[in-house]
Amino acid sequence: MKRDQLKRAIVGVLGAATILGALSGCSSNSQKPAETTTAKASEESKKEETSSVAAQSGSETTAAAEPVTVYAATGGSPKPFTFVDSSNQLTGHNIELIKAIFDRLPQYKLEIEVTDFPSIFAGLDSDRYQIGVNNFAKNEKRKEKYLFTDPIFANEYVAIFAKDNKKAESINTWEDLAGLKTISQSGINITTALENYNAANPQKAINIEYSDEDLVLQIQDVEAGKYDFVLMDKPMFEYYEKEFNFNVTGVSISSDVAKDLMEEPYSYLIVSKGNEKLVEDLNQALKEVIEDGTSKEINLKWFGSDYSPSYK
Amino acid sequence: MSKIFDWQLVFTEIPLLLKYLPVTIQLTLIALIIGWVAGLLIAIVKIHRIPVLQQLCTLFVSVVRGTPIIVQLYLTYFGIPIFLKYYNFYNGTSYNVNGIPPIIFAIVALGLNQSAFDSETIRAAIQSVEKGQVEAAKSLGMNGLQIFFRVLLPQAVTVAIPSLGNSLIGLVKGTSLAFTCSVVEITAQGKILAGNSYRYFEVYCSLAIIYWVITIFIERLFTYIEKKMSVPEQIAEKKEA
């Protein structure tokens, strides 16, 4: 029996050592001089042309010759901002705009990946993605975690009420919505706008209920009276209304008031921390895209009117 | 009130979703193999009470069974890059994970998850084999490996099959979360299609049908295997009971 126990102990220790050794395998490699890693890096970039922005930002001079790949992530929804069309192509206002921006930045190569919406944030945190493109709004907490480009889109919000709801008639400003019950998905720009408003007006707060419920169901809940209203981007509501023909009315929230209350009713591209140079380049190109009318063209194509932010 | 529910779409979308069925199957099969192999290893460690390894395995099984699979997918897909970021910073290296296809992360996470669940099934199955059988084999002069492969494993497999089938069904449905790692399988494709048509509910109905059919197929398959593999004695016992 004793021999058996000894044998087990030896197997156990050796096995554990193997596992730990395998786990820390990369650390022993790294102790080797830096030349091996750079060789590896160039090998990789040859193979797949994948090199992070961080890796090459140090060698700006060589970057001109070989474009740096930037990974952008989108949730592929909502249409018409970002979606995959029937021929399996990623498209939409945000997507065309970011492509137009990158057309003016030959030093970068853009790769857009479609992923689950919450994964965009997790991916930016881990620098797996450098850009999030999903009609993102800005708030204080996001500002701490991510870098923002200049605005890409000037939002207009509509509050959707059931057609027979009398309350809809008296809504002009955000304050008129105080005390009413709404439903919203966490993380999206509308929820951000609502939260920003609530933070600024704690006495006149709007009741937000959070849900991952699909927007169609949300609107149906409003129709059924479960919630008083649901807030949507105006251009999006127009698309939904066309598709489903809901029994609801959309009340535009006066954008002047919105501006006062929320300081910035815009959408942005968000960029992971540590890529300040990328943001600078993006802003430069974005300005050109807006000034030469490309942005207007894209807006007219998707929304029928121009929501480009104006720079003075 | 035009077409709140477009039932035709439920069926017309199924072929579009089935284009991505190979991805779902690939995820399932590879994760299944990882799960069985790693699960068997963990079970052996636990049965033989091998010190240190046993504690590590217990910790692993406890953590994996105690956390939702979606969290595990996040941890592998985004945790590893964060780890590398720190690692690169402190060691001056430039390892980059973007070169590794996302599906690898999904497969590894699903496979490890599966191994934790299967290890307990396999352990229980091996331990269900009577001690007398092992002693009989020993008295016939078989060595450890022979006993394991000729006596323990064949009997254990019969016991384990129903539970393994059950966890395979769980795995198939677990693959529907792979979109968190940017892997486009049928559920992800469903969400993408709905992003265009706004019709999420219809897509979820189509997906329900597809997953259900897959599950029925697996159930049948395992019933068949179970019949084929059952030890004659056990059938006799069942009949008596």
Image: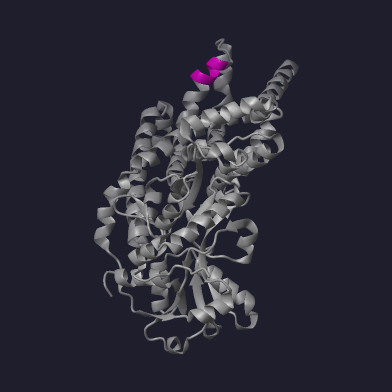
Q: Position of residue B154 (x, y in %)?
A: 47, 24
| Residues in magenta, as a range | B145-150
Rendered position, B114 above or below A199? above
User: In the rendered view, does A106 fall on the left or right side of B56?
Assistant: left
Q: Residue furthest top?
A: B141
B231, A306: nearer the viewer: A306
Q: Which residue shows up at 41% across the image and 29% down it? A: B230
Q: Position of residue A6 (x, y in %)?
A: 74, 19
Q: Quadrant of residue B191?
A: bottom left
Instruction: For residue B49, say whether it is visible.
Output: no
The reply, left or right, for residue A164 in relation to residue A116 is left
Q: How many marks?
A: 0
Tell me which residue sits at (38%, 38%) in the image. B25
Is B149 magenta? The answer is yes
Q: Quadrant of the N terminus of chain A?
A: top right
Q: Position of residue A282 (x, y in %)?
A: 52, 54
User: B76 or A4: nearer the eye?
Assistant: B76
Is A44 contained in the magenta span? no
Give the x, y percent position of residue B86.
67, 41
Q: Is residue B233 above or below residue A116?
A: above
